[in-house]
Image (tube, rainbow, N blue to C red):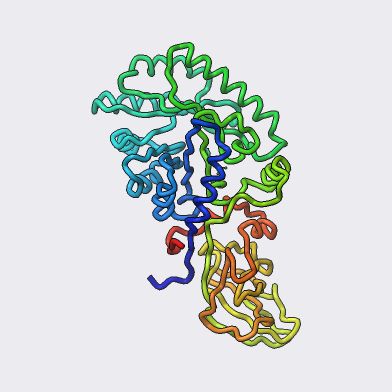
Amino acid sequence: MFDDSYIELSKDALSNNLQFIQSLLPEGCKFSSVVKGNAYGHGVELFVPLAEECGIDHFAVFSADEAWDVHQMKEESSDLMVMGMIEGDALEWAVMNGVEVWIFEPHRLHEVVRITGKYKRTARIHLEIETGMHRNGLEEEAFDEVIDLLLKNARYIEVAGFCTHFAGAESISNHYRIEQQKLSYDRALRYFTAAGVQVERRHQACSAGVIRYPETCLDMARVGIMQYGFFPNREIRIQYTALNMDNMNPLSRIISWKSSVMAVKQVERGEFVGYGNSFQAGEAMVIATVPVGYWHGYSRSMSNLGKVLIRGHRAQVTGVVNMNMLSVDVTHIQNIQKGDEVVLIGNQDEEEITVGSFSDYSDQVNYELLTRLPGNIPRVLV
Ligand SMILES: *Cc1c(COP(=O)(O)O)cnc(C)c1O
């Protein structure tokens, strides 16, 4: 209602990113748009319908809680898949609403079988195979039990997917491990198909997989970070650039984050700014306060390091980032006024603050920065 800051999403940027990613996917490979973590902080409410306008009709979330939200805003014809946490009543809700769920232990499959029997409804499941990530995934010992359940209940259970997740496809140091995971997945798939289990879609790849291991795209790719306009890390960006001999970034940032100057103050040489003494004015200075702090997702580790844009100039965070505000040095900016636009992420005139710059100053990766943007910051479409 009375907003301290707001987030803008660009439809053009999204449409550009989706087209780029589609161009990398092999013929017949489905694009599953990963919208966990409130669409990586972009806000599912705005993002999901926007993605649908751009042709997306399959979404992936982590939990039942997230699925509940996305289910409210997606088109009925779009599919939705829960890759992680879902138990009890939520599982029943999912089956009754056609929400697909990952099965990584026999227990959940027994539950799904019970629910489908009770309501005579068909459930769509994805079998997540343990291939070396050692997080979630069906262990080999459980294969026979799962196959038996599937064959006995084939009427009510559709195996929508056969999948696994790589343990860090974005880093070359994991290459051997990923290759082993691929082999292990293939073995498991042969085992299930030989036993008569019919699998609709095989899927493994996340964003990094699409770039580094294109052969793993198979029938579906689960793409998160790249659709929002970011390579998973610098290594993948470099790999893409090297392969394509072209230094143009094919991805565009969708998100911008903006606030405004709350107050302006003169500070004399030798005075300290903010809590404690981490910043001392080396000269007479002008300081502006901005009503954004770590509560809003602006990390405290950006104290004395972060940069914002005001009137087309960079202004440096001075002193520590507070819970609800931060101070910036605007000594060099002419005519600064209360109410001037402050760009925390995004462009202003010729200047830009990138999401990547946050990881240059702190060990926050883009995934973390984005998902820590609170859900209650208003999102607007541009
Ligand atoms: C988050 C996630 C993805 C998407 O990862 P990106 O690196 O954002 O593309 C894919 N699969 C699973 C299982 C995930 O948890």
Residue found at the far left of this picture: 119
Of residues 17 and 227, the one drawn nearer to the viewer in this rendering? 17
Q: Residue at x 51, y 17 (%)?
A: 141
User: Residue 197 versus residue 243: which sits nearer the camera?
Assistant: 243
Instruction: Please provide percent x and percent y for residue 345.
Output: 58, 63
Residue 128 seen by the camera: yes
Report how many numbered discs are placed on residues in the image. Answer: 0
Q: Nearer the viewer, residue 259 or 271?
A: 259
Answer above or below: position of 318 versus 134.
below
Asked if 245 appears above or below 318 in the picture, the reply is: above
Locate residue 196, reporting x and y percent. 43, 13
| Identity of the residue drawn at 44% across and 52% down | 47
Quarter assignment of residue 311: bottom right
- Ligand 1's quadrant: top right
Q: Position of residue 332 (x, y in %)?
A: 69, 81
On screen, residue 278 above or below 243: below
The quadrant of the picture occupied by the N terminus is bottom left
Residue 179 sits in quarter: top right
Horizontal relation, residue 282 to residue 115: left or right: right
- Answer left or right for 324 relative to 93: right
Q: Is residue 324 visible in the rendered structure shown here?
A: no
| Residue depicted at x 65% and y 81% | 333
- Name the residue: 60% across, 80% down: 288
Q: Is residue 342 left or right of residue 123?
A: right
Residue, far right: 282
